[in-house]
Image (cartoon, grey):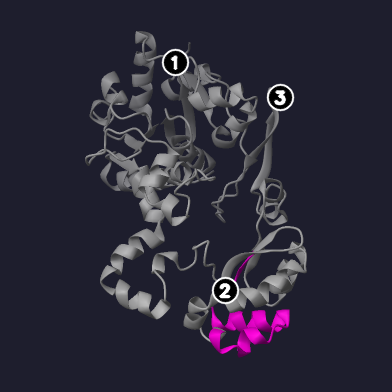
Amino acid sequence: MQPLTGIRVLDLSQFLSGPRCGQILSYLGADVVKVEPPTGDIMRLLLMATGSDRGIHTLHAGKRGLIIDFRKEADMRLFLKLVRVADVLIDNSAPGYMEKLGLAYPDLSSRNPHLIYVAISGFGQTGPARERTAFDIIAQATGGAMHANHQDDHAPGVFMADLVSGAYAALGVMAALRTRDRTNQGQFIDISMQDVVYFQNYWGFADRAVEPDKGNMESILGKPMADLLSDPNNPMCFWNSFKTKDGHVAMTALTERQWKSLSEVTGIAELSTNPLLDSFVNRIKNPAPGLKLIEPWMKARTSEEVVKTLTAAKVPCGLVANYDQVNHDPQLLAREMLTETADSESGKFSIPGNPIKMSAHPWTPPKPGPIPGQHRKEIVKEWLGEEI
């Protein structure tokens, strides 16, 4: 039995943020029903159009499929009956859409006071921007992440806003379930993607926190704190990605012990003897001498040699992995993050494993995600005790 066994979830969401919430709940044992319109989830349609529809399983494996056409009275009645016995509803529709259907939280909670309704949107349910529509890139832009990553002029490569917002939504659901255990009442969970990105943007909120001290800090460090580790025009010698013979390796020698170990294992004595590099503050002020010493050592070796050598000396490092490398990483394989699932209809599919490892709840890879409406009969029978 998994932690959320017995919890019933109606996942009305599309694209990435809501489905990630449903994925986490499903991986933890919840019965997650993927509700789609007759035309199918928009993300499913986009993937099918590009011939990559296997990708739908990366977020929907383990869920069951149900088609609901809200324009039909019979489907609306069925949906409302399912709501009465559901524990959780996930929604990431455009602002105002559920209200127009009469399916907003006040409408559904009047039918099921125990319902936990999680709404993920670009800017949340309050504030002057609440009615604006957003996608991942908009949330990353307005939450400060694109600027922090020096991506002001190009799109980010990781859908952090979507996927991390889905994870926070799942966290909120689990907290609400715990609260319901005590109060017997559901509640509304309001997740703003902009909020989540800002919450992840350490340099952004730290910059506000230390605002009274910024002048003094900059005089000590010789540069703004927010650019300390990420300025592409002035990289740090102790926190950087270095070119090797065949790729790149990220390396950190943040502490004095790590810096000393780096000097010893590379045989570059000047890293320890050069007065410009003899303290953390000096290395911040004068990264160039350190880079000049470290870069040739890195370039003369393969990435594997660098990682093996530095790891033996307990200097934190790692291969800058491309898609092919990360998808064949032996560490991820050992951690069951590279896994497959299969059934007789769909064959084999690669899906990500569960990053939440629990000693009392071993995880088994789920079945592939549903085709639209695949489980209508069994959902109605199991949830409502009716035959169709």
Between disc 1 and disc 2, the foreground one is 2
What residue does disc 3 label? 344
Q: Nearer the viewer, mark 3 or mark 1?
A: 3
Q: Secondary structure beneath disc 3?
A: loop
**Marks 3 & 2, CB-CB < 8 Å contact:** no
Query: Which quadrant of the rendered structure holds the N terminus?
Result: top right
How much space separates mark 3 and mark 2, taking CA atoms? Answer: 52 Å
Residue position for label 2: 238
Q: Amino acid at mark 2?
A: Phe
Amino acid type of the residue tagged 1 in the rendering: Glu
* Dominant secondary structure (helix, strand or loop) of the stretch shown in magenta: helix
Determine crowd level at label 3: few under 14, some 14-19, many 20+ residues with C-alpha closer than 10 A.
few
Which residue is rendered at x = 69% and y = 39% of the image? 340
In space, the residues marked 3 and 1 are separated at their CA atoms by 27 Å
Q: Which residue is mark 1?
A: 386
Q: Which residues are magenta?
A: 250-276
Q: Who's the residue at 69% across and 22% down the image?
A: 345
Taking the spot 61% from the left edge, 32% from the top edge, the residue there is: 55
Q: Position of residue 214 (x, y in %)?
A: 31, 72
Image coordinates for residue 182, horizontal then vertical, percent: 29, 48
Q: Is residue 188 above or below residue 247?
A: above
Residue 303 in the image: x percent, y percent? 74, 63
| Type of amino acid at the residue the image marks with label 3 | Ser
The answer to which quarter of the image holds residue 260 is bottom right
